[in-house]
């Protein structure tokens, strides 16, 4: 019996496979050669360019765009990757509209920035498609470094350390490396198994041993790692999911948005992935948007994204909000969850309108829901960690934690925003500091 | 509405826009369509002597350089004169001129440097009813090696000699087309005048190699692994052509010699600029080859609008108006002092002015922490480079200092009077004269 978007409950197969394939196609397809030349030509090659300053990994953007413009995208890729080894993924997932492209002088002047992200993808894809890994590993140093967590921070740190000749053991709790690149972002930003391919490409540097299924408190302890290795880098991300803290939260049909996205990303056939008819996503960040949009693309009839403050306070960028709206997601703002209603399974969810300071108004609404995704933030999990600060591992500017010989970076550590590109920068910088420490 | 009708050395055309002798004018089919599209005149693709026509290469004839978005900026060609039999061309010219009596039809001609050759062919061509002749002394490739084209144009004595033969052979106007591949365009222009030519047209194409295939290590366009210098044309050559037009127009000996301006004319504005420098009309090729015949509509509407705005009733009203303002460097007013001014409201903070000035000029632009760029008047020599590299038109301008105002760079007040190098105290000649 075939299903449709009108079918009640949480069910698979709402859309035909052809429609699913179209819905989950590349959000921003790679520029073709001529498009890249035209886009590159718009760059003014600014002096001390604002885009470079805005990039957490300090990529020399004017230089790589000029290299594209002069017909050497491979050289452009080297410029990018020498600063950001995950430049390919960052080209896909970076919120460029709040980073490099936001400060592009052409954005300021005419509201149309140079398409830095898409140009970066053009360059990195060109190089990676040729199968070239542009870096060589130095002679082995005999030093051993444990990197815990094979997400953006860990991969970045591992690559840089391996490049310097250190032997890296890269641990991850999941069965595959990649972290949020592999499990945590919308599928249409990383089509054709790009995250997996990028990890394989990165590992070509050599000197990195991947061990999966191991986590701190699950086969690993920080004390043991410190004893076994010359240095330890923690890039373990935020494994816990914040609870709504309302009555009825344990009812069926309520799950973490990150789990939904992970299941979706690992699915071989999205027509077999169940989705509700009436889906409510609670939260206002990138994860909330990724969950809401993909729920819609899977064939949910109604998808509401509900955020407790106004749109300008949402962590999701304006671009992401517009994307959600364009896909048919209804964005409800200034509404805080109060109760989950249903008999064992969620049927409705009740919200109270709240102002931007979260003061209740006494006005209550109910949204029909057969599936609810929680996306109100994640928390650090683990025991025996270095000292924390505001719920994250406290680190200094080079990633050093309170424990001697232990560095940390990415979402699990204090520092910059919880972005892929920031994690890459922190992993890289910690690796540089580890290398310096091991070279004494 | 302005009257665009043109009378160039007695040759009348509905507007001053002619198609230059080139592939677009090689046959009846093209020329009829050109006239229908609005072109005022056509210089037919160069005719050669009777007998078997020349042959062209069977590989690429053109090479190009591009700007953004593959906008064609310069074109070079290695095509020769018409490769169709003379009689075929003459039959077609006859039919076209009969059907378009009000349009200008000029015959471009190139035969060997022998008196009887020229004197035989011109009357034959005149039977088509054409309005005049253009002597092709400019083609820089293929024909030059055979003693024709630019091989003639590079020897003023030959120009004078052939022009004289031609004037003896016909009553129709004779225009001498000049090559730019010379050291001083005044010599060939004066030779044409001495030979009795009614006008000169310029420029023909410039010797050029547009690019090199770095795999084959061969110039482009490449024929079986080899290339040869072609003739360069298109927007890139316009500045060179305009200078040569102006040199002839302001030279006392040739000042009254009519000029048909050629070289990268792409828009009505280009045409107006050539004519302001002294060209009585203009000829176009590359722009038509790039965009098709329709561009003449923009040229007509644009020139009309501009003439109306300026109050010019006919093209003769503004031809040569800029010529008196073309002078030699030594006569420029050294007491005219300007300073760059950056409009902060328009500035998009790209910093290109800063990089250009700091790295390559006079360190006269300051950059603040918040990327505010300002001109240091005590360093600014008014070179204009910042204006030219600024991506925002009108953002940086040059302010003229008032007489008496302090020039902070020199520490001297601006002199009120005109003063040039000929009288400047640093000029040894000027001092010697005292």
Image (cartoon, coloured by chain):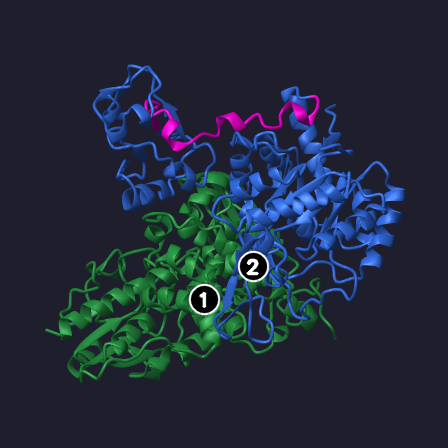
Q: Residue most toward the left?
A: A440
Is the C-beta separation of discs 1 and 2 under 8 Å? no
Q: Observer-nearest residue: A309 or B211?
A: B211
Residue labelled with disc 1 = A73
**Residue placed most toward the observer, B51 or B201:** B51
Residue A272 percent across, percent down from the top left: 62, 75
- Asked if A321 appears above or below B415 in the picture, the reply is below
Parent chain of label 1: A
Percent of width and height locating residue A284: 46, 52
Mark 2 residue element: helix
Q: Where are the magenta residues, as a range? A: B313-339
Left or right of residue A174, residue A253 in this image: right
Point 14% across, 71% down: residue: A437
Query: Looking at the figure, which quarter contains the C terminus of chain A?
Result: bottom left
Residue B328 forms part of the magenta stretch: yes
Q: What is chain B's hue in the picture?
A: blue
* Of callouts 1 and 2, the N-terminal one: 2
- B431, A381: nearer the viewer: B431
Q: Residue A134, how many percent across, how many down?
A: 36, 75
**Number of residue marks:** 2
Residue shown at the point (38%, 59%) measured from the top left:
A419
Label 1 sits on a secondary structure element that is helix
Q: Alpha carbon of mark 1 to alpha carbon of mark 2: how far?
A: 13 Å
Q: Which mark is residue A35?
A: 2
Chain A visual colour: green
**B287 or A279: which is nearer to us?**
B287
Task: Answer yes or no: is residue B22 visible.
Answer: yes
């Amino acid at each position: 019996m075939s299903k449709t978007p009108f079918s009640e409950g949480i069910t698979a197969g709402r859309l035909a496979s052809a429609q699913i394939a179209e819905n989950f196609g590349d959000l921003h397809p790679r520029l073709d050669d001529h498009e890249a030349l035209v886009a590159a030509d718009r760059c003014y090659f600014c002096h001390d360019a604002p885009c470079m300053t805005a990039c957490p990994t300090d990529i020399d953007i004017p230089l790589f765009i000029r290299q594209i413009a002069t017909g050497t995208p491979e050289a452009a890729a080297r410029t990018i990757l020498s600063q950001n080894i995950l430049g390919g993924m960052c080209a896909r997932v970076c919120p460029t509209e709040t980073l490099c492209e936001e400060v592009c002088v052409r954005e300021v002047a005419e509201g149309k920035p140079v398409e830095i992200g898409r140009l970066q993808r053009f360059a990195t894809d060109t190089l990676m498609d040729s199968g070239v890994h542009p870096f060589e590993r130095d002679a082995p140093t005999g030093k051993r470094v444990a990197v815990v967590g094979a997400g953006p921070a860990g991969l970045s740190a591992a690559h840089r350390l391996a490049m310097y000749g250190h032997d890296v053991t890269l641990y991850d709790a999941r069965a595959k490396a990649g972290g949020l690149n592999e499990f945590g972002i919308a599928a249409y930003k990383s089509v054709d198994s790009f995250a997996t391919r990028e990890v394989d490409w990165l590992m070509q540097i050599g000197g990195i041993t991947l061990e999966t299924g191991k986590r701190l408190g699950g086969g690993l302890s920080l004390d043991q790692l410190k004893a076994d290795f010359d240095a330890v880098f923690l890039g373990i991300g935020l494994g816990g999911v914040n609870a709504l803290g309302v009555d009825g939260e344990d009812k069926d049909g309520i799950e973490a948005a990150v789990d939904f996205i992970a299941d979706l990303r690992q699915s071989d056939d999205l027509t077999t992935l169940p989705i509700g008819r009436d889906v409510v996503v609670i939260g206002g960040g990138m994860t909330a948007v990724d969950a809401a949009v993909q729920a819609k693309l899977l064939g949910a009839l109604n998808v509401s994204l509900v955020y407790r403050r106004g749109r300008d306070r949402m962590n999701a960028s304006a671009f992401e909000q517009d994307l959600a709206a364009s896909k048919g997601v209804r964005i409800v703002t200034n509404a805080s969850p109060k109760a989950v209603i249903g008999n064992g399974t969620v049927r409705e969810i009740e919200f109270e309108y709240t102002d931007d300071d979260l003061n209740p108004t006494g006005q209550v609404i109910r949204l029909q829901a057969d599936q609810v995704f929680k996306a109100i933030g994640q928390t650090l999990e683990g025991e025996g960690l270095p000292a924390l600060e505001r719920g994250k591992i406290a680190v200094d500017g080079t990633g050093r934690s309170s424990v001697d010989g232990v560095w940390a970076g990415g979402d699990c550590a204090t520092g910059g925003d919880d972005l892929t590109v920031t994690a890459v920068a922190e992993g890289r910088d910690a690796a540089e500091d580890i290398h310096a420490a091991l070279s004494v | 509405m302005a009257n665009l009708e043109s009378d160039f050395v007695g040759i009348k055309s509905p507007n001053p826009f002619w198609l230059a002798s080139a592939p677009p004018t090689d046959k009846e089919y093209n020329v009829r369509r050109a006239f229908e599209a609005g072109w005022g005149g056509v210089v037919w693709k160069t005719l050669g002597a009777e007998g078997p026509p020349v042959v062209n290469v069977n590989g690429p004839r053109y090479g190009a350089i591009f700007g953004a978005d593959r906008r064609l900026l310069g074109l070079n060609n290695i095509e020769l004169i018409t490769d169709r039999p003379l009689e075929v061309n003459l039959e077609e010219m006859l039919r076209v001129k009969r059907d378009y009596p009000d349009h200008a039809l000029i015959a471009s001609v190139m035969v060997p440097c022998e008196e009887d050759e020229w004197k035989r062919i011109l009357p034959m061509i005149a039977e088509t009813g054409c309005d005049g002749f253009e002597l092709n002394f400019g083609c820089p490739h293929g024909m030059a090696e055979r003693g024709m084209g630019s091989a003639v144009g590079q020897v003023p004595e030959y120009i004078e000699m052939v022009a004289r033969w031609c004037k003896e052979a016909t009553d129709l106007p004779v225009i001498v087309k000049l090559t730019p591949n010379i050291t001083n365009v005044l010599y060939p222009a004066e030779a044409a005048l001495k030979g009795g030519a009614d006008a000169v047209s310029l420029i023909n194409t410039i010797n050029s190699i547009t690019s090199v295939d770095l795999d084959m290590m061969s110039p482009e366009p490449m024929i079986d692994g080899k290339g040869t210098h072609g003739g360069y044309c298109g927007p890139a050559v316009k500045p060179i052509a305009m200078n040569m037009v102006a040199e002839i127009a302001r030279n006392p000996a040739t000042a009254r010699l009519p000029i048909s301006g050629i070289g990268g004319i792409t828009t009505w504005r280009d045409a107006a600029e050539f004519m302001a420098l002294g060209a009585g009309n203009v000829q176009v090729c590359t722009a038509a080859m790039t965009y098709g015949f329709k561009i003449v509509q923009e040229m007509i509407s644009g020139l009309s609008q501009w003439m109306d705005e300026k109050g010019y009733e006919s093209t003769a009203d503004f031809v040569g108006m800029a010529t008196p303002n073309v002078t030699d460097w030594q006569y420029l007013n050294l007491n005219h002092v300007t300073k760059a001014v950056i409009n902060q409201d328009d500035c998009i903070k790209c910093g290109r002015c800063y990089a250009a000035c700091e790295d390559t000029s006079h360190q006269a632009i300051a950059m603040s922490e918040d990327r505010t760029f300002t001109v240091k008047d005590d360093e600014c020599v008014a070179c204009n480079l910042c204006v030219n590299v600024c991506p925002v038109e009108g953002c940086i301008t040059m302010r003229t200092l008032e007489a008496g105002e302090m020039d902070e760079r020199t520490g001297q007040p601006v002199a009120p009077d005109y003063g040039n190098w000929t009288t400047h105290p640093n000029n040894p000649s000027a001092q010697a004269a005292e």
